[in-house]
Amino acid sequence: MPKIFERELRLLEQQMIALSALVEENVLLAIKAVKMRDLPLATRLIDGDETVDAEEVRLEEECLKILALHQPVAGDLRVVVSILKINSDLERVGDCAVTIAASARELCEMAQVFVPEPLGLLADAAVDMLKSALDAFVRLDGTGARRVCQLDPAVDNAHRAVYEQVKSTVTRDPGMVEAGLHVLRISHALERIGDHAANIAEDVIYMVEGGIVRHRNI
């Protein structure tokens, strides 16, 4: 591997790790804004979304530049392609964090709200999937990435449990409909974070092992 290409590839990986840390932190803060009903924090997260978007674009441009200038093959090509795909999923996770923060902001301004117990379980499960998928990327751990994919049903089940509790609550008290809609919006965003984490894990498996496992039972 030419030294210039090797240096650019290592820099690309470092940028990917930095973006991962930023997005993960935004998700954690968005969840905190919901739990603490922290209006300033929710607003700050919404206003800061442009930072994630700008980093995603910059990383994509770097990937395309490396593909055009160095035309990598085999394992090096898999690394660049995987980073390109993970980058896209991270940007979408960042959007989910903004969605959570936006609903948190609305809930902060309501006199009466409710947070179903399964929402906390869902948040923990989604964050666990995201953290584990990103750790698998850093460690180049295909086995760990497979474990991430196996966690997805638990996230889906928690999302369904939130839906059932919201439906039960608003049926008893129609005055809670607006709050319930925001809770469902948060729940859906968390479920989508789990989906994106699974996508990232699949890309890690491809990067490490060279096999495409999407749509397979792994």
Image (tube, helix red, strand yellow):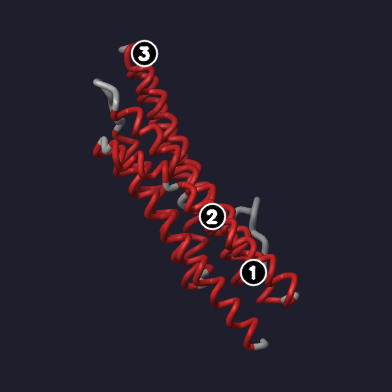
CA–CA distance between discs 3 and 2? 43 Å
Disc 1 target residue: 80
Q: Is residue 17 left or right of residue 179?
A: right
Instruction: Identify residue type, mark 3.
Output: Thr
Q: Is residue 73 visible?
A: no
Q: Residue 24 location, x and y as percent?
A: 41, 55
Disc 2 target residue: 54
CA–CA distance between discs 1 and 2? 19 Å
Of label 3 and label 2, which has the lower sequence position?
A: 2
- Which numbered disc, 3 or 2, marks the residue closer to the eye? 2
- Which numbered disc, 1 or 2, marks the residue closer to the eye? 2
Give the answer, above or below, for where 142 lies relative to 94.
below
Q: Are marks 1 and 2 in contact (CB under 8 Å)?
A: no
Q: Residue 93 location, x and y as percent?
A: 49, 48
Residue at 61 percent across and 83 percent down: it is 6
Q: Residue 214 location, x and y as percent?
A: 64, 54
Numbered disc 3: secondary structure: helix
**Any mark on residue 185, and which?**
none
Numbered disc 2: secondary structure: helix
Disc 3 target residue: 171
Q: Is residue 180 left or right of residue 109?
A: right
Instruction: Identify residue type, mark 1.
Output: Val
Residue 116 appears in which quarter of the rendering? top left
Of label 1 and label 2, which has the lower sequence position?
A: 2
Numbered disc 1: secondary structure: helix
Residue at 35 percent across and 25 percent down: it is 165
Q: Is residue 197 visible?
A: yes
Q: Decide which of 51, 102 is in the foreground and name it.
A: 51
Q: How busy is the neighbourhood of tag 2: few (under 14 within 10 Å), some, or many (20 plus)?
A: few
Q: How busy is the neighbourhood of tag 3: few (under 14 within 10 Å), some, or many (20 plus)?
A: few
